[in-house]
Image: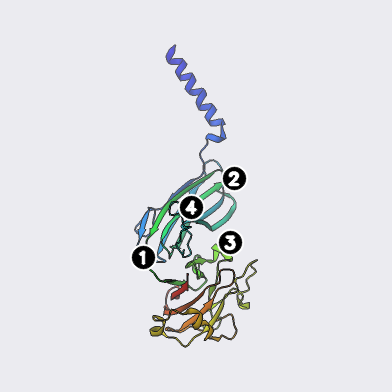
């Protein structure tokens, strides 16, 4: 009799759990592990490193509705001037959404490949991959990336980053100069916070395919963003040798000459140095060296950037 009561009680609990949507599982989300795809926490040794991630999501009793990819930066991705007000135990942080996509109705499962570019300043970034179903239940997976730069007394931030010709899904063509972040097109599509960070866009010449850099105000880009940063770019007489010894970025900018049109570099050349001024507030001067132009594959342009802190 006692045994039958236990069986009956467990049966009733099972029915109650099945009826309680709060106890039902949300979408299943996995990060695919392989020699190519990252799934685990890592300590990085390079600025703007690239990592490939593959996400798989499957609905559990309800179709999938939305996919999101986000990164929390601790501290913020832009360079920090450390002073008495800086709290090492509670550094400023920022979360950026890299993907926010509504799926087609009735989607039961989806796989997504993502190639990310890591931070260029010291700190932690937490990448989170999430799926939400039609019942607003969310499943997610995440990993942490840590990067520590050597201590320096330089009053400018320097890094090397690769930008890619637009076209294939996920190519990183949109550059935020101060933060050193490179966004693919899907990360600036309808994501106003990311749009407001972009200073330069890799724009291939429509006739020759030659790589150029343009500001968001360049007419040929046709950007309809609510905020387009009015970063100013100028041609300089500097080269790859003098770039290394230049620390007065304002002088390099003021001595530079305007491009024609003002918003585009025209075809880039290896060894070319471009000066820039980001818009107010928090305007910064800087210089860019075109280190390498890769004509094969995704037509990368490798840039060395120096920007005042």
Residue 129: image tag: 4
Which of label 1 and label 2 is nearer to you? 1
Quarter of the figure with residue 294: bottom left
Mark 1 is surrounded, within 10 Å at the Cα level, by few (under 14), some (14 to 19) or many (20 or more) other residues, namely few
Q: Earlier in the sequence, mark 2 or mark 3?
A: 2
Q: Earlier in the sequence, mark 4 or mark 3?
A: 4
Residue 151: image tag: 1
Residue at mark 2 to residue at mark 3: CA–CA distance: 26 Å
Asked whether 66 or 80 is in front, the reply is: 80
Q: Is residue 212 visible?
A: no
Residue at mark 4 to residue at mark 3: CA–CA distance: 19 Å
Element under disc 4 = strand
Residue 240 image position (x, y, % from top left): 40, 83
Asked whether the residues under the numbered discs 2 and 4 touch, taking CB atoms below 8 Å apart as contact, a structural biologist would say: no
Residue 286 image position (x, y, % from top left): 49, 76
Residue at mark 1 to residue at mark 2: CA–CA distance: 48 Å
Residue 197 image position (x, y, % from top left): 55, 66
* Residue underneath mark 3: 193
Q: Earlier in the sequence, mark 4 or mark 1?
A: 4
Asked whether the residues under the numbered discs 4 and 1 touch, taking CB atoms below 8 Å apart as contact, a structural biologist would say: no
Residue lying at the far top in this picture: please name it: 1
Residue 134: image tag: 2
Mark 3 is surrounded, within 10 Å at the Cα level, by few (under 14), some (14 to 19) or many (20 or more) other residues, namely some
Element under disc 2 = loop
């Amino acid at each position: 009799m006692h045994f039958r009561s236990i069986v009956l009680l467990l049966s009733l609990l099972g029915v109650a759990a099945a009826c309680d949507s709060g106890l039902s599982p949300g979408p299943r989300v996995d990060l695919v592990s392989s020699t190519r795809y990252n799934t685990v926490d890592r300590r990085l040794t390079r600025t703007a490193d690239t990592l490939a991630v593959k996400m798989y999501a499957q609905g559990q009793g309800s179709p999938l509705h939305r996919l999101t990819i986000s990164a929390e930066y601790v501290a913020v991705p832009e360079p920090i001037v450390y002073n008495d007000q800086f709290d090492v135990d509670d550094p400023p942080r920022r979360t950026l959404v890299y993907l926010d996509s509504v799926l087609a109705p009735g989607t039961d499962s989806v796989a997504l490949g993502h190639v990310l570019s890591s931070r260029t300043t010291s700190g932690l970034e937490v990448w989170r991959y999430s799926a939400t179903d039609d019942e607003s239940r969310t499943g997610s997976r995440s990993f942490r990336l840590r990067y520590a730069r050597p201590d320096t007394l330089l009053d400018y931030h320097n890094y090397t980053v690769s930008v890619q010709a637009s076209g294939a899904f996920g190519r990183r063509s949109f550059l935020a100069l101060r933060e050193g972040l490179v966004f693919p097109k899907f990360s600036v599509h309808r994501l106003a916070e990311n749009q407001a960070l972009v200073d330069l866009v890799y724009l291939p010449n429509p006739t020759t395919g030659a790589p150029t850099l343009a500001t968001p105000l360049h007419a040929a880009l046709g950007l309809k963003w609510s905020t387009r940063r009015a970063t100013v770019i100028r041609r300089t007489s500097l080269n790859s040798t003098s770039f290394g010894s230049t620390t007065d970025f304002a002088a390099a900018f003021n001595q530079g000459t305007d491009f024609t049109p003002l918003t585009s570099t025209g075809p880039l050349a290896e060894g070319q140095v471009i000066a820039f001024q980001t818009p107010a507030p928090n305007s910064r001067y800087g210089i860019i060296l075109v280190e390498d132009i890769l004509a094969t594959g995704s037509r990368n342009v490798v840039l060395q950037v120096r920007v005042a802190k």
